[in-house]
Image (spheres, helix red, strand yellow):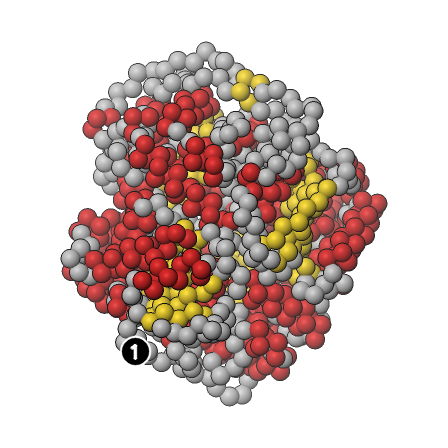
Amino acid sequence: MAKKPLALLVVGLLTFTGGMPLALAVPDAAVATAATQQIPELAYTRFTLPNGLTVVVHEDHKAPVVAVSVWYHVGSSYEPKGKTGFAHLFEHLMFQGSENHKDEFFKPFELAGATDQNGTTWLDRTNYFETVPTSALDMALWMESDRMGHLLGAIGQPQLDEQRGVVQNEKRQGENQPYGRASELIQAEAFPANHPYHHDTIGSMDDLNAASLGDVKQWFRDYYGAANTVVVLSGDITPAVAQEKMLTYFGDIAAGPQVPRPQPWVAPRDSSTRGTMTDNVAQTRIYREWNVPGRGTRDENLLELAAAVLGGSKTSRLYQRLVYQDKLADDVSIEVEQHVLASLFNLQVDVKKGADPAKVEAAIADEWRKFLKGGPTADELARVKTETRASFVRGLEKVNTQATILAQGQLYRNDPGAYLKDFKEYMAATPADVSAVANKWIAKGDYTLTVVPGKVEETDMANVAGRAAASGAPPPVLSAKGDYRTVTSDVDRSKGVPAVGTFPDLSFPALQRGKLDNGVEVILAERHTVPAVQMQLLFDAGYAADQGRKLGTSSFTMSMLDEGTKSLDSVEIAKRKQRLGALIASGCGLDYCNATLNALDDQLKPSLDLFADIVRNPAFRAADISRLRGQWLAGIAQEKSQPTGIALRTLPPLLYGKGHAYAIPFTGSGTEASIKSLSDADMRAFMGDFIRPDNVQILVAGDTTMAKIIPQLNAVFGNWKAPAGKVPAKNIGKVAPPAQVRVYLVDRPDAQQSLILAGSLAPSTEAPNDLEIQTMNGAFGGTFTSRLNMNLREDKHWAYGAFSFLQNAQGQRPFMLYAPVQTDKTAPSVAEMLKEAKGVIGDQPLTAQEIDKIKVGDVRSMPGGYQTTSAVMGALQGIALYKRPDDYVQTLKSRIEAQTDASVEAAAKEIIHPNQLTWVIVGDLAKIEAPIRALNLGQVQVLDADGKPAAGKPAK
């Protein structure tokens, strides 16, 4: 659910923000610089078709792809009482095919190699988007125009019933997550009962059940006309070509009726209100919300600055007070959720276990008073502004991001360049400006919701009365009538979807290799699309290096790196990162640990200095360890309250067996006991063993050359010397498959869904037939139109999605089947998954068409998939980790095409072993245990959330 660009600048949701970075300077100088800096502009051409459809075109020819972004000016705020959830339900129906393509909408796009494809619904709009190879643009425009102009004949009762079930499982899946019911209640309490925003987008089960075929068809007639639509084309296209193609495909579609447009209504409260909810959660969470002005207003823009200063990062006021100083909370965040009629200013605090929520609220109130009285400092504002500018530079690589920015401006404000106005206000804001707006909007009238651990409430939050109706609601205003007309099209739609005859080749940089003075290898991929450089210090370590140590040592140690160096504390590190606009992080995967830097060109030297200090000189101070330990333990508790977290903690030890390096929670977080006992000595020992110059490769991608980067890296890493002793060898042994099927159940009382995760062991990612394995998985369960998803989602509509996937690993890797399903369909879903697994290696092998679909999609998606520097860095990491040749990406096309059907079928028989699967099913034991046992799959054992046998539940 997309938000407006300026908000994303602050919260980094899609990382679009902008301009040139600030030097590390004194606050006053930083503020002066911020006022004069500009951000990159997205040049555009805009035109309107005779039928009222607005088109915006942005040229970006760096890759042979075009983003197609179609935005309809209707969302859940347009739904009348009794028809909640209709906008989102209709979005789903738009993927069911059209009158001239009576099949899944995704199928031609999978064959064309589309990327970034989806649809979303939010309060004010519904959008559909995909990025396609330039040569597939006609196909994409034909498909989008066919469902816009020729849909109703393809929608019948079966399609409605199918997608109603899918949407209801999407609702169940969201509400089955910890805190998953909170947002719906907050929205109902935020806005009066007669406000268009009173109900959430997903809607109520009752209204979804009541939706009729006539209702949904009328929704299409009312809101899906051409004059209520914006289409943005961004990428390898010219305005002239765009105008010709848009008129050809969309010109004959009717404008549609005038639309009654809801009008802005902030509806702030005069006094504070509050509520409490119990849920299956690990710790108390406090939410607090204020109604504030809608997107595009100066006040809302400045409130984003207030949110960032109060709770946007580790350096924010509330994080410093509640997490660092008072030690009452594990996490704090504040963001502005922007909408057209009004926005929500949201505070969220995870209360530390054992802390008094009343003391948390008192500390919040104290910091709030201080902020309202004194406002932000100049330095606080300067740091936030620098971060946003840096993010914009990075975020504009993707054409889909560009299209989103332009579409939001046009749809909501009739100005594709509206983000420039927002950014200008944002950058010009003074501390006094922000203080005045904060006092106007967030000094009173909050709603507080406290979610506490306990029994899950059975009430559908969509049916909660919430805030009572209020006076002052403005009436809707009809959209402009317009003198619209259609034009005759010469497109013969009876011929079906246009064929895509040719596809562009991938342009991927040749890898270059060099060495530092101390012998450290540097691998570079030049990419000069944005003035930024990414680098990764890749260490041969990972969760597997925890073997013989306390579980979680690797991840915890790497997370401690930016918590303080010998000369800087954690807060100063965070402030310096903000001032530089640099992103620095560290962590681990199964087989590696890494430290990463993303720096703007003209701040690379000071960013590298900070980066090297963090990696080479961690302090491991007792106070920082204690703080992170508390947050880490809270994180483990959160994992054990999430269905997917429980399954990913439980399944790997069962698959690999005691003593194996991979027999650990795949979250990498360890156990409560291991983290409680972890000491600074343990961390220093890990650093000495693994985080050292003779165990690292430096990967670099971006706007630099080998001649430039080697001296810069030598200056900070060239004198790094390895300690005595060798790097320990990781012991990743080979595991024999189990003799029979095993089934493990984990109780999650009152769960609306069951999470099904089944696994077996497959060969390493380094296997010679890895491509065949990946192709097989794509057809079986790895894509939207794969067998598993088409069965459980599209045919049975028991799940929002069902898939299979492989976790990359240097040793044997897990092959997993995944499906969150409605509780009463748990056992039938297991039976269907097992049927599909048996069929694909038995009497229903993959067809040539299924295999070819994955192969051509993989090849044709590469130009879109490698648009960004981050994608190039991901390829570099894969080459380094899995011993791939330097030309791996450049030769991928020919190797994918060379796969034979027989070799893919052989991979299926090598990987899929239905009689060796280990099943972990997390759900309401009282409802699922008997039906699962009745399947007679094998021995059934009930486990607790720690993966240990549950008391009083013997295996049988």
Foreground residue among 622 and 274: 274
Foreground residue among 506 and 260: 260
Foreground residue among 178 and 735: 178
**Residue at left 42%, top 82%?**
659
Foreground residue among 761 and 435: 761
Tag 1: residue type?
A: Ala
In the rendered image, residue 686, in percent from the top left (x then y), is placed at 55, 79
Q: Which residue is mark 1?
A: 736
Res. 883 visible in picture: no
**Residue at left 26%, top 68%?**
915
In the rendered image, residue 52, in percent from the top left (x then y), is placed at 44, 19
Is residue 817 depicted above or below 369 in this figure? below
In the rendered image, residue 874, in percent from the top left (x then y), is placed at 43, 59
Q: Is 651 placed left or right of 831 in the picture?
A: right
Res. 629 visible in picture: yes
Which quadrant of the figure has residue 437? top right
Q: Is 673 placed left or right of 728 in the picture?
A: right
Q: Residue furthest top?
A: 483
**Quadrant of the drawing holding the C terminus:** bottom left
Q: Residue furthest right?
A: 373
**Residue at left 43%, top 43%?**
168
In the rendered image, residue 540, in percent from the top left (x then y), is placed at 45, 74
Is residue 313 depicted above or below 735 in this figure? above
